[in-house]
Amino acid sequence: MPRFSVIVPAYKVQAYLHECLESVLSQSYPDLELIAVDDCSPDGCGAIIDEFAARDPRVRPVHLAENQGLGRARNAGIEQASGDYLVFLDSDDTLTPHALRSIADRLKETGEPDVIVYDYARTYWSGESVRNVVSAQLAEDGPAPFRLEDRPGLLALLMVAWNKAYRREFVEREGFTFPPGYYEDTPWTFPVLMSAESITTLDRVCVHYRQRRQGNILGTTSVKHFDLFEQYDRVFAFLDERPELACWRPVLFRRMVDHLTKVFARRDRLPRGCRAEFLRKARAHYRRYRVPGAQVPPRSRLRHTLIRWGLHRTYRALQGAAALRRLTGKLAVKLLRTARTTALRLHYRIQLRLPLRADRAVFAAHDGREHSGNPGALEDAFRALAPHIRTAWLARPDTAAHWTALARSKYLVNDTDFEPGMVKRRGQILIQTQRGTPLGHMGLDLQERPAAARDLDFERLLDGVDTWDYVLSANRHSTLVWERVFPGGYTTLEYGHPRNDVFQKATSADVARLRASLGVPDDTVAILYAPAHRDHRRTQRSDVDLERLLRRLGPRFVVLARTHGPVQQGARIIDVTGHPSVEDLCLASDVLLTDYSSIMFDYANLDRPIVVHAADDDWAAYEAARGTYFDLRSFAPGAVGRSEDELIDIFATGHWRGSRSTQLRTAFRERFCPYDDGRAAERVVRKVVLGEEDVPAFVPLDERHPVPSVAATLARSPQATVPQPTGPLTVTDSL
């Protein structure tokens, strides 16, 4: 008997069916049967199902003699099912990787409940993925399993069958089946949730819900949308048979009204000439199932009034008025923006004719955050060493103060280009800090890399370079790259990166405070996962299954995930993507896991372990799209995993902090960290602002003592327990 019976009805979805079935069969949890139901589809769905059945014995094909519709096709699958739990999946959707394993683990944790509810994300043709907006209802806090009355907010979720798994014995005992017609999920989902003796939730995206441009059944204009009335008749008939569930009648009544108004308001649902009839039937249902005295939320009262009285023309008039109001509002906003832009341009031109302020400096960073990166560290040095200079941050280009500061400040500090239209005045000094040591191609080298360059204007790029007076560099490698790819008359300052000064100044108390603020448990190894942006991908997905990694390594490891896309959900995965300080995250972690991100050059200053994930095919794709200045795999800052299994072995066997990893990191630091000794910002201010020629000498690498990580401190303690992996592991020494 398999753990899961995954039921996939198929009808006119041959373009999507391969991906759907493959997403099931490729699950890391293999204890399943896949019941694929060909609902007498006129295209190639039946043949595709038979192909999958021929190659995988877990596939059980079911061919219906005539088209039954989605509900009855699911019923045919239920009849063939033998698994502990039923999982429904529409044939144009997909299961996310490791979804079934996560579901199985949660079921075991919560005592085999009747129903488990998990999350989904809408995926669009553009590649964009948007998680369910009411996912907070799936929080795993509190006791589990529970009954619906303990978590009534679950009824706010999308009422579909495919975001849940159902214990088969429960379904058979209660006699649940899907009805024919549109909206067949409605009389299934409500009764199931209300009847379940035990429910649990899984706060994880397990289904990618494809948003098709065309072909979605519920987005089709048809009189079949009138089926909705009959489906709610079935829901309330179920309540009539179960007096003990009468308490849910007001809730279901409100959901019915909301559902009816949604269908009525969508102009792509009902054919012309049918809208008045639909509203008349809605009015009849309102009166039939209304619960006297039941409270109606304020935001829903207008809809209830329109449905209750069948005000068809009033409803259309209000819709038209709302559309006109939106159009008028957009026009007004556009006019205001145009007027504001014109006024700001005039203001800036006036400010350019006024004297410079020698005691002013303005700072800006590429991420729009105040006091971040190299500019933020330089501002601190300005305040400490040149207190006579007033500093400010440029964060609001839509204000007059922004353009005043840009026009009249003597010192301009940025790690990217200033706004288009900025005029560099005589007497102004512009310090370009850059954002790190380059591994991937930059500047003019991107002319041959259209995937990475995208819409980069190279003439405008060089115009910006002509405004630079000083460019900061952390090593000779960076200097040689910057002067070639950003050719100009500036002066290069090989002083180190100011943002890395904190690594030499932080204390163990600072590290403990940062870990506590991030929620990193005591006596755990914190892995900072920070992959590079992929120029050749429309969407940024993680190449490492963080849940699997943590599951294999055991409870003593946590991950601080800072990615360019959605972060995997997990109890020991801490999403730090929006954290304002990368430096704080580096200090709070014990080891860096990255691929090609330039964060590795900064992290090496901490002299903490670095692990690189560089699969051969991924490295080839990145190199082809972006281009690199050296082969990272041949000159790595630590252990290199060329597959996810190798990556797990590196952590599980201790190679991540072994002697070979230390040797690699030492050579890497000698090449890329010669000047980051904690005084980079001081050197810049003394040279550029105070005019001193003799800047502080560089501290040699072997005389620097950056604050140790928590894991390193524990490892040196004779009483410490070194975190160990759990479960059997295969050791692969790729070093």
Image (spheres, rainbow, N blue to C red):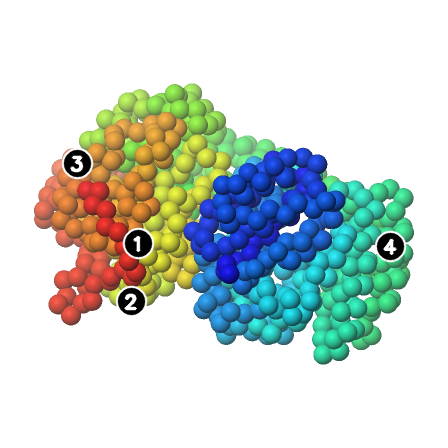
Of residues 431 and 84, the one nearer the viewer is 84
Give how far apart the Cα atoms at labels 4 and 2 are: 61 Å
**Residue 243 placed where, x, y %?**
75, 78
Sequence-first tag of 2 and 3:
2
Tell me which residue sits at (82%, 68%) in the image.
289
Give me the disc on residue 522.
2
Give how far apart the Cα atoms at labels 3 and 4 are: 74 Å
- Secondary structure of residue under mark 3: helix
**Residue 190 placed where, x, y %?**
69, 65
Sequence-first tag of 4 and 2:
4
Give me the disc on residue 279.
4
Sequence-first tag of 2 and 1:
2
Residue corresponding to mark 3:
671
Please rate how many residues cluster around mark 3, counting C-alpha atoms within 10 Å: few if below 14, some from 14 to 19, many from 20: few
Give the foreground label among 3 and 1. Answer: 1
Sequence-first tag of 1 and 4:
4
* Amino acid residing under circle 2: Asp
Residue corresponding to mark 1:
527
- Secondary structure of residue under mark 4: helix
* Amino acid residing under circle 4: Leu
* Amino acid residing under circle 3: Arg
Relative to 143, does residue 636 appear above or below in the rendering? above
